[in-house]
Amino acid sequence: MRSRWQLLPVLLVVAALVAAACGQTAPATPAATAAPAAASAAPAATAAPAAATGGNFRFGQSGDIAALDPWNVTDGNSLLVTRQIFETLVDYEPTGFKIVPKLATKWEASADGKTWTFTLRDGVKFHDGTAFDAAAVVTNFDRAKNTKDALRPSKPVADDFAYYGDMWNGFDNDSVIAKVEAKSANTVVFTLKSSFGPFLANMAMSTFGLISPKSMKDDKDGFMLPATKGVAGTGPFSFKPGAWLKGQSLTLDKNAAYWDAGKVSLDKVTFRFIADTAARIAELKAGTVDAIRDFSPADIPAVKADPNLQIIPRPAFNVAYIGVNLAIKPFDNLGVRKAVAMALNKQAIATALYAGEAKVASQFLVPGMVGYDESVTDFYKYDEAGAKKALADAGFPNGFETELWYMPVSRPYYPDPKKIAEAFASDLAKVGIKAALKTEDWTPYRKDARENKFGLWLLGWTGDNGDPDNFLNVFFKPKVVDGKDTPIEAGAWSNPQAWDLLRKAATETDNAKRAELYKQVSKIVQTDVARIPTFHANPPTAASKKVTGFIPHPTGGEAFTGVKLAK
Amino acid sequence: MGRYLARRLLLLVPTLLGVSVIVFLFIHLIPGDPATAILRESATAEQVAALNAKLGFDRPLPVQYLEYMGRILSGDLGESFHTRLTVVDQLKQKLPATFELAFSAMVIGTLVGVLLGILAAIRRGSMFDYGTMTVALVGVSMPIFWLGLMLIYAFAVNLRWLPPSTRGDPPELVRTGLYTVDYLAALDLAGFLGALRYLALPASVLSTVPLAVVARQTRSAMLEVLGQDFVRTARSKGLRQKTVIARHVLKNAMLPVITVVGLQTGALLSGAVLTETVFSWPGLGTYVLEAILARDYTVVQSVVLVFAFIFVMVNLLVDLSYAWLDPRIKYA
């Protein structure tokens, strides 16, 4: 006879599963209470950080770096690492975009804005012992500018100097930099084809960090790869061969001969690559890393509740937007576009889905940037009735059906794209626009957005250099075909007046005048509803309370010079 | 046996050829291209087209395929267009990593699974039997990702007994690439134990499915053999239960179990992606996943070929082992 006890194991397992499922709220990471061996061993309380020196700062990031060559990478993970090894002539101030000296102590522009002269800091050496001088600057810039330069890798590595082409208008004769020359050992002169508003802002970008010419000459094809025999910069931390375990970690040592060594406290920095977000947060909680970034706002409350951890907010420097495609009906109708803009209750979404770490965007530029228009408080105020009326006036009293595309991966500006898209869709539905939610793999998503396949889509942008040109020009410049201006790539919008203003602003070096020009461009973007800016998000860093002196920079790349680790 | 072996090895060629064509077509069918995958959101169509052309990805497919096969035949598995690291170099690091993980998982799964299966078969109908089989069912159905995260939270975050993820520090001298073996070879006990600690959670998680499958298979194979006449004869001869099981039943029951172990091993080597992802274990699974996301065609093609080769060889070994286990089986 079968004993009914034989059902017991089945019942126990089912009960355990049900309990585990109910025990979870719906956070991005499982609540610790659902763990089977749930022992809530309270971690020992940390004493207040004592005077801290030394230590190994372990930073958990979402992926490996692409190469040890800042000129050839564009992703945040790579640039954060290279920032510790290589330095630029000038830098941004710690929390903003004012330009401050770094490897250059003085700089001057000619009256026509076409010549820039930099005086270099004395006594700086690369990690390999060679002197940092004007010739080194020339070598670095020439290698990037000239596609046939002798020091270029034989085959493209990683992003193949993409940032140089982007920020300086192209390579060889297209580049706005005509010549870079060493006038003396510590004077370097840049000659431009025309005056260039974003010049200094570009020079501070960490992608243009200076590499020792010896590293390039010794092994131009391999100095940036994991098996490198050595690569040298001038930065606070140096890299020793063998310290990069591909896919696992990368360790840097303190540069004892750093020109500002007094400021550096840490002995080592170890970057650990932990792809899974939940696992990264688990490592922070377990104390096996000291700081992490790139996680969902939904995880912020859990970090704040942990007595050993802190959230270090980052000043916002990105813009999330909804793209509208004027090539797809009915978005060619201005009234329809206005209705879409008015239908969105952005503030509610900012509060609910960003855990408070976002601001509603009134324009594309970020507050604090040159050209930010304080007088504009909304990009179309949230107005459901107004949206319905605009739709009716445009000939759609009963609304219409369309698609809203969102990306399948978390982005700093849209950390939870699915939920945010659902919120947008529900707002649109209230005014009669029935938007079906669609997504696809991230790579074809970007391709299709660029090729104008979407009617409405979510996308965004993190700024590179704090310059308004970097925000507005990137989105709204015309697609130039055979020398003629044609509608912009993603969105098919055209407005020759705006294009003229953008071109003028790019060559203007007086910031006050540039600000005026960019304000006009922003106004046109708003009147035309060329694209709908939605949020400026602050992607935070989470760290152990033992970490002090960590100052996140808006661009997402900060030097760890002043970071201290309490024992 | 020799002819059989030769025939099986010869069959490798058309098998791998077929795999290469299928993989090549599939990976190229996925929408998106390598340049779009690695450049930023703001890249223009021109920049994308330029990079693709530089990398040679805009050529007609048959041309690309033939060039790729040409290199394979000369022993060059190619390199990542993005990182410029050769597949062979990366395999030297990542294959041992996956092997260490998969082997440990198989050892746990097989040992525990066979043990549970035997006990369940002997105590058929008891609570132990039902309990074990239920656990096996749960093991097969449990999402690995969820189980992994649960164990990380339990053992790493809360109890702090084990590290949460990754592989830990490599030994000073890397001989085989298997951290446990290399630390032992260097007589570094602390390092060896450290490597075991990092291996514990991911290997346990990865072992759940093989454990479940092996347990069930062992149980049913044992039951079948236990029901045969010769077992009744052995028992009536007065042999003890332990002798009956160990010397007579087990060997006969092992055939189907070995089949399952072999298939599971092949599956584990290529299917550890989920476990490797959740534990950030730098093995083949994450390697090929990243390559797919980056549309790194060469890497995907070469790694899948390696998987196919491993799978075929493992199955060949399984088949050969039948002849050893069952003297009635002969290969012509």
Image (tube, coloured by chain):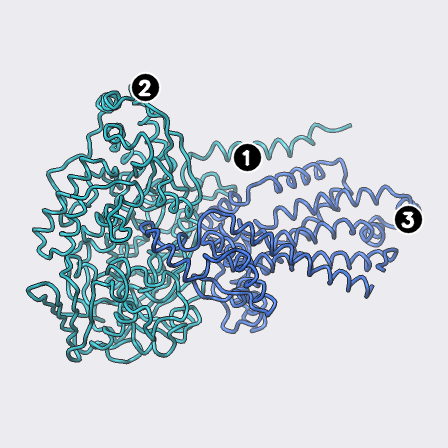
Q: On the rendered image, what quadrant is the C terminus of chain A found in?
A: bottom left
SS type, badge 3: helix
Q: Residues within 10 Å of mark 1 (few under 14, many from 20)?
A: some
Residue A152 position, x and y percent, is 35, 71
Tell me, yes or no, whether dots 2 and 3 are on the same chain. no
Residue B197 visible in image: no
Q: Nearer the viewer, mark 2 or mark 1?
A: 2
Q: Nearer the viewer, mark 3 or mark 1?
A: 1
Mark 1 — residue? A17
Left-right relation of A175 to A409: left
Mark 2 or 1 closer to N-term? 1
Spatial distance from mark 3 to mark 1, Cα to Cα?
Answer: 44 Å
Task: Report the chain holding disc 1.
Answer: A
Q: In cyan, which chain?
A: A
Question: Image height check: is A433 above or below A529?
Answer: above
| Residue at 73%, 62% in the rendered image | B10
Question: Image height check: is A255 above or below B303?
Answer: below
Q: In blue, which chain?
A: B
Question: Image height check: is A111 above or below A465?
Answer: below
What's the amino acid at mark 2?
Asn
Spatial distance from mark 2 to mark 3, Cα to Cα?
Answer: 85 Å
Mark 2 — residue? A398
SS type, badge 2: loop
Q: Nearer the viewer, residue A288 or B126?
A: A288
Q: Nearer the viewer, mark 2 or mark 3?
A: 2
Which labelled disc corresponds to residue B234? 3
| Residue at 63%, 54% in the rendered image | B19
Tell me, yes or no, whether dots 3 and 1 are on the same chain. no
Which labelled disc corresponds to residue B331? none
Q: How many marks?
A: 3
Residue B46 visible in image: yes
- State which quadrant residue B284 falls in: bottom right
